Amino acid sequence: MIERTHLRILREIQRRGSLTAAAEALNLTQSALSHTVKKLERQIGTSLWRKEGRSLELTEAGRYLRQEAFRLLPQLERIDEVLEQFASGEKGTLRIGMECHPCYQWLLKVVEPFLSRWPGVEVDVRQEFQFGGVAALFNHDIDILVTPDPICKKGIQFEPVFLYEQVLVVSQDNPLAELAYIEPRHLLDQTLYTYPVAIERLDIYQQFLLPAQCSPRKHKTIEATEIMLQMVATNRGVATLPQWLVDEYSTRLPIVAVRLGTGGIAKHIHLGTRSTEVPSKYAVGFQNLALKIGETA
């Protein structure tokens, strides 16, 4: 029944003051405009206007439709604009899954400039995956997975965006703070704090302690990075974290980073995406920004 063309006709008649001017504004002939309105009048069973001499008077139905035209058309035009933004990749929601606790600190460095560059895009960060992020990415629950431990799976691709070193964090009062590097035996009498992650996914165990058949005196898990570092700062234990994260906190906490072994443990933050589809423009923009920030870190 009512189409956008009908609303635009009533709005332009009000704006322009005549059928001729309204028709010109809408790129219609006056006869085509009149025909369109007459057809609508037949459909709704009532007149929208009447001519009194050379002037045009809207009926009550016409005035109502004119009022609704001024109310509805801006909303419809806004819908058009938003849909165009979606189509052009300028608007949407970027869903990011996090598989590691300290990665969230790194993510903040990327999100702030990303939001400035893409004002029409919302960012939804989901941290509940732990090590189920690949399944979430594969099932389209998220668009990008941030992880230091990529898992090969058909249809999923990973790109390294930020290289860092995993280090041991100790209190300045801990004797280990004086060493150039840590050997596995140095942790035999220490309490080791880690995030609540299975041992088989912890680098400190898989790449450092277990190959040397060593274990810390105690192993405790803590969810929050800040609490973990407070415990380390008061010399209640040690932890392993990215070097860049320790550098940030060492300015306000009495903590020191010590290399794990003579060569250290090198890690990458990876971004995982689905290789089976073309990513949105803003998803590509996020990846490029992450790479740029990683290169300058």
Image (cartoon, rainbow, N blue to C red):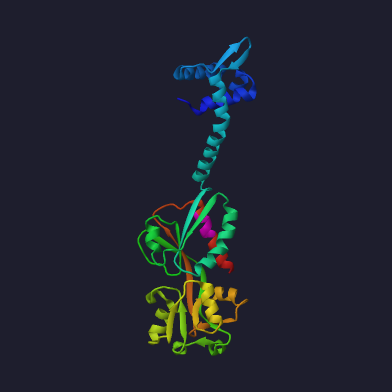
Q: Is residue 130 visible?
A: yes
> Which image quadrant for residue 15?
top right
The picture places residue 78, in percent across and down from the top left corner, at 55, 38
The picture places residue 42, in percent across and down from the top left corner, at 46, 16
The picture places residue 55, in percent across and down from the top left corner, at 63, 13
| Depth order, front residue of 128/37 | 128
Q: Is residue 9 visible?
A: no
Magenta stretch: give its range: 283-288
> Which image quadrant for residue 297?
bottom right
Query: Going by the picture, which residue comes out furthest to the top?
Result: 53
Indicate whether residue 137 is drawn in magenta: no
Q: Main secondary structure of the magenta part?
A: helix
User: On screen, 168 above or below 109?
Assistant: below
| Depth order, front residue of 54/278 | 54
The picture places residue 269, in percent across and down from the top left corner, at 48, 68
User: On screen, 50 above or below 293?
Assistant: above
